[in-house]
Amino acid sequence: MWAASCLASCCAACACDACRTVVSGISRRSARIAYCGLFALSLIVSWILREVAAPLMEKIPWINHFHQTPDREWFETDAVLRVSLGNFLFFTILAIFMIGVKNQKDPRDSLHHGGWMMKIICWCILVILMFFLPNGIVSFYESISKFGSGLFLLVQVVLLLDFVHGWNDKWVGYGEQFWFVALLVVSLVCYVASILFSALLFYLFTPSGVDCGLNTFFIVITLIFVFVFTIVTLHPSVSGSILPSSVISLYCMYLCYTGLASEPRDYECNGLHKHSRAVSTSSLALGLLTTVLSVVYSAVRAGSSTTLLSPPSSPRAGSGKPLLPLDKADEHYEDKEKEKEKSVTYSYSFFHLIFSLASMYSAMLLTGWSTSVGESGKLVDVGWPSVWVRIVTGWATAALFIWSLVAPVLFPDREF
């Protein structure tokens, strides 16, 4: 017994030392990666608790205070929501605390990039405290998470549009024939992939002998969007490019696929229903990994976007540096440039806000948007709410892209 306690103490000490080593190794440049790792950890904890915590939560009186004990899926959903709520509060508190940080001399800048042991402890405490909250608060968080998830998807769409237009401008800016040919090739590949994708959707989600009018409507509307993108882009009065149109077309088709794939596995129009009886741990892990990568990428890109997030004082916001420094005015300018170098390059507050919204979004994915249909409790992101969220996101993407093309024509005096 004495040897076992000594061994346990040694293991705990080693674990603490390992944590300190990892935390001390987080530099200013790797801070955003550390936040991503913490967010990914929250998803892993959510998934683990979803699988194992239900029997324990059934014994907690302030959670299971019902006259009749709910189904196991209710406790699985509740566990995910409580972890998500703790994660949401952690990043929301940081987002509020970081409002107005514009310079690295601000004491809050060091808190954003350092103090990791304290932040990890606070995160753990918040997550644990969530399991002491009454069910009403968790239910309210579940309701607002649907709206927060919609905002996160909207941010994803805006970031995609920003990325595609930036990609096109960069290649066109080279002014060489090679890059123009590359633009044409990539555009053609995306258009061909979109058409082939639509054919695959018709094959998988409109099986013969079954009335699948809703699925047909979703696919046809997406195809119409593809043609509208091309027509508007090629219109003489619109200064559009074929590359953004083709990439957005493929993305809208992908969103249509993810929406249809999220239909309940017992739905007769879902061609993927044959796999619902043989869901392995590896496929679940793959689905969760895909979700983690998607959410983390969106959060990191949002935190790095110079178009959306860089404050006016940022060095990336613009530069009017003279070609040849000649006098004292130029020396004064150089002093101002040095001051700019100490300015923050992105909004810390908005960076944490993105993780807050992503916490809501990931909770909805892991709980099937808090809806249990058939075997949705065993799968990631399955259920009719998920279907409609994906489809509506595709429509919103189409609307935003068309607006980005026609807005400069409708309002020529405004800068877009």
Image: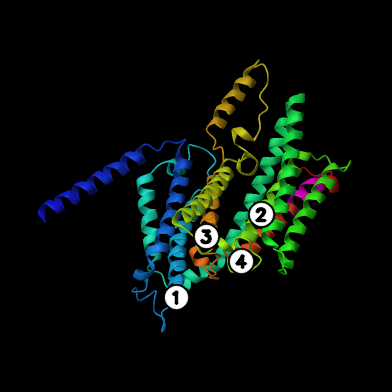
Which amino acid does the dot numbered 1 rest on? Answer: Asp
Which amino acid does the dot numbered 2 rest on? Answer: Leu
Q: Mark 3 to mark 4: distance in Å?
A: 13 Å
Q: Which residue lies most toward the right here?
A: 236
Identify the residue position indicated by label 2 in the image: 255
- As drawn, is 199 to the left or to the right of 52? right
Q: Mark 2 to mark 4: distance in Å?
A: 14 Å
Please name the residue shown 72% across and 36% down the image. Answer: 186
Q: Mark 1 to mark 2: distance in Å?
A: 32 Å
Rendering coords of residue 383 (x, y %): 58, 66
Q: Earlier in the sequence, mark 2 or mark 4?
A: 2
Which amino acid does the dot numbered 4 rest on? Answer: Pro
Part of the protein shown in magenta: 399-408
Q: Secondary structure at mark 2?
A: helix
Rendering coords of residue 313 (x, y %): 60, 37
Picture disc at residue 71: 1
- As drawn, is 313 to the left or to the right of 252? left
Residue 150 colored magenta?
no
Identify the residue position indicated by label 3 in the image: 380
The kind of secondary structure the magenta stretch mainly shows is helix
Q: Secondary structure at mark 3?
A: loop
